Amino acid sequence: MIKNIQRILIELANIHRFVMRFFREVFMPPYEFKEIVRQCYVVGWKSLPLISLTGFITGVVFTNQSRPSLAEFGATSWLPALISIAIIRALAPLVTALIASGKVGSQIGAELGSMKVTEQIDAMEVSGTNPFKFLVVSRVLATTISIPILSFYTAAVGLFGAFLSVNQNENTSFRVYFDQVFDAVTFLDVFSLVLKAVVFGFTIGIVGCYQGYHSSKGTEGVGKAANWAVVMSMFLVFVEEILIVQIIQAMRA
Amino acid sequence: MLKTGGHIDYNTEVITVRHVSKSFGENHVLRGVDLKLHNGENLVVLGRSGTGKSVLIKLISGLLKPDSGTIEVLGEHVDELNEKELQQLRLKIGFSFQNSALYDSMTVRENLEFPLVRNKRHLSRAEINHEVEDVLDAVGLLNTINQMPSELSGGQRKRIGIARTLILRPEIMLYDEPTAGLDPITCIEINGLINEVQEKYKTSSIIITHDLACAKSVGDRIVMLLDGRFERQGSFDEIFDTDDERVKPFHDYNFIT
């Protein structure tokens, strides 16, 4: 029991050191611009097909599921406003983060994990270069930059999916639909999307990198690193969602 | 091919290891070892698997920290250096890993450029290309420049790994099992390359191995790690001129089987 508590405390101390090292190194030159751009391409561009599909389906399904409840009160004309608030405030950043946790988090965990167990990270270190800056800082920055952009994209695709459903069932035109959508959204809603997406992106990057960077025990360790990167980042995304919603509610009041 | 050892300066020590111990949990790998590497010397560390040979060179390069004892490399105490100082010292140390540790996602050219562009930022593109081609030529693999590591054979990977360390012109080379997993012909080629590197780049080297043919071919001096301590040292013949039951089977297996 005491040994378990000790192990958890040591792990927490290691995570704290890892995060602090990121903030120390992110501002110190030299900067790995080329690698950051490459990682943004890997994280952002290569996730687009999956994000497009899930964002679109989320929009359509949410609209179809919400319609009966509003129809009971004859309030289906509120659908665009309801959908826009739900997608901008909650669904877009959350769906993007969950997809990215699975796709990007596991990829980062497995890639760094395999580099660790095949001594590629040690090789960078002994050749007088800084593997942390090249591997960790670039990836965490890439996820922190890309997830907010992807979240806006998810929101756009989701709103379009919802439009198709609304247009089909309520005969609402494109212009009327998007007028209602933008009327319902406030600056604080957009701010909450950006804040959540930045925090989620940072979490996915740092968790994936931490798991990969500290993996051991050969190929088994690589699998564990990828697995834990997904599990931990998904768990943390939900915890952060609750906390940020509380903060935004307090700001709204 | 036996070595001549012509350039060795026995008055200058480039690495001095004093009373170094290292344990992993209950496993006491090194128990107060002492070691000296002279300038220009190829020193072979022999020993069975799991006796701490690789741990020793990881301690020397600062990848691991000793539990006790001191390690001096080119006049600097490795365990007292901060991160930046250690990074500077590492530029003078080449480390050839057992599995080559080539960066899988990069081509051979990018593997070689990686340490160069980050440590010699003043170099022009033409100078970088020249350096890359020069070391690739030195290891005889100029034709692989645009290949991915996955397209190379085991021996080629070893050579590229050595080329990647040579590109920074190190003063000291640390080879971790350079011939492990290679066929006998490739082993002979790698041994020849280690001797060529010593001659051409005037390096001092520690070669970790359990391959006696390699030890005999590249070693100016040999030390044998037994039970966490250096029990024997000298020339190849001196090492095996013994009735020690821990040493004899080692020799017999390599040369009788």
Image (cartoon, coloured by chain):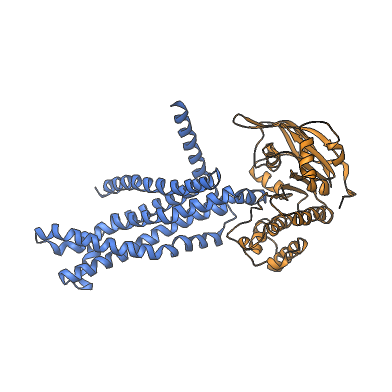
Chain colours: A blue, B orange
Q: Give the tally of numbered discs.
A: 0
In the picture, residue B110 is in which quadrant? Answer: bottom right
Rendering coords of residue A177 (x, y %)? 21, 69
Q: Which one is in front, A85 or A131?
A: A131
Rendering coords of residue B81 (x, y %)? 68, 40
Residue furthest top in the image: A2
In the picture, residue B69 is in which quadrant? Answer: top right
Rendering coords of residue B230 (x, y %)? 77, 33
Residue furthest front in the image: B257
Q: Is residue A178 visible?
A: no
Q: Which one is in front, A172 or B157?
A: B157
Residue at x 67% of width, y 50% of height? A128
Rendering coords of residue B186 (x, y %)? 75, 57
Viewport quadrant of the N terminus of chain A: top left
Q: Which one is in front, A58 or B180?
A: B180
Q: Is residue A174 above or below residue B230?
A: below
Q: Is residue B81 above or below residue B141?
A: above
Q: Which one is in front, B34 or A219?
A: A219
Q: Is residue B67 visible?
A: yes
Q: Is residue B4 left or right of residue A241?
A: right
Q: Is residue B250 left or right of residue A30?
A: right
